[in-house]
Image (spheres, helix red, strand yellow):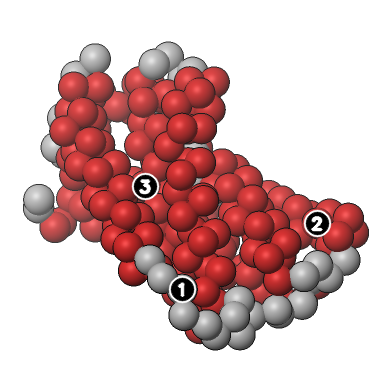
Amino acid sequence: MPAAPFISLIKKDLLMEWRQKHTLYGVLLYVGATVFVVYMMSGQPEAHTWNALFWLTQLFVAVNSVAKSFLQEHPTRFRYYYTLVKPTTFLLAKMSYSIILMCIMSLVSLFLYYIMLGWPLAQGGLFVVITLVGSISLSAVFTFLSAIAARAQQNSALMAILGFPLVTPILMILSKLAAKALEPVYMPGWWGLALVLLLLDVLIITLGVILFPFLWQE
């Protein structure tokens, strides 16, 4: 994969995001409002409830920040991009940008949880790492689904239908991985879950690389 087009596409998305600051501020406002509503409804819950609420929040943040990556592109632009870059380069650049955006939003969300809902974590550093890994997983899934929805006449409902069976096991794995950060105790099978999550990520990215060129030509 050529590095120059890949980097240029990421810079293009960053520049567009910077020019349309209202969209970025809207996502930040959504993150803050979501965490505040969770705080108003639950106060400072016990550790396992805190963990479950955090990952549900991450799901909503991913839907509102990452899932629009392809849907915000005008259909006629795809014909222009088709003449410039390879489809795999375009998809991986979109995924990379979505990962950057989602990691930032996840850290903001985690900081707001710390302020409003407390910090019931015995291993905070591990939880931060799992949060970033989870951001990569959710970004890969929703970017791939956004690509499918964009090429299916901008049908965002299709993304919700396809996303449920893919996102549910990822969220369950992430919540169980994060449970290790709640208490400094040995958890049998933890590395096995981490391997399963890694394989799921590789599978989703591989499917995207294989299938997107066919969608690109439509």
From the viewer's perspective, is 88 left or right of 100? left
Left or right of residue 45: residue 161: left
Q: Which quadrant holds residue 198?
A: bottom left
Q: Which residue is mark 3?
A: 140
Q: Is residue 164 left or right of residue 8?
A: right
Which is nearer the N-term, disc 2 or disc 3?
Answer: 2
Closer mark to the observer between disc 1 and disc 3: 1
Q: Whole-percent x and y of residue 145?
A: 40, 32
Alpha-carbon span between mark 1 and mark 2: 28 Å
Label 1 secondary element: loop
Q: Label 1: which residue?
A: 187
Lower position in the chain sequence, tag 1 or tag 2:
2
Mark 1 closeness class: few <14, some 14–19, many ≥20 residues within 10 Å: few
The kind of residue tagged 2 is: Val
Q: Is residue 94 above or below residue 182?
A: above
State the separation of the CA atoms marked 1 and 3. Answer: 27 Å
Please, what is the three-letter code of the amino acid marked with disc 1?
Answer: Met
Q: Residue furthest front?
A: 188
Residue 167 rendering spot, x and y as whole percentages = 48, 41
Q: Residue at x 61, y 85 (%)?
A: 122
Query: Whole-percent x and y of residue 24?
Result: 60, 53
Of 182 and 22, which appears nearest the observer? 182
Instruction: Give the CA distance from mark 2 to mark 3.
Output: 26 Å
Which of the 4 image quadrants contains residue 80? top left
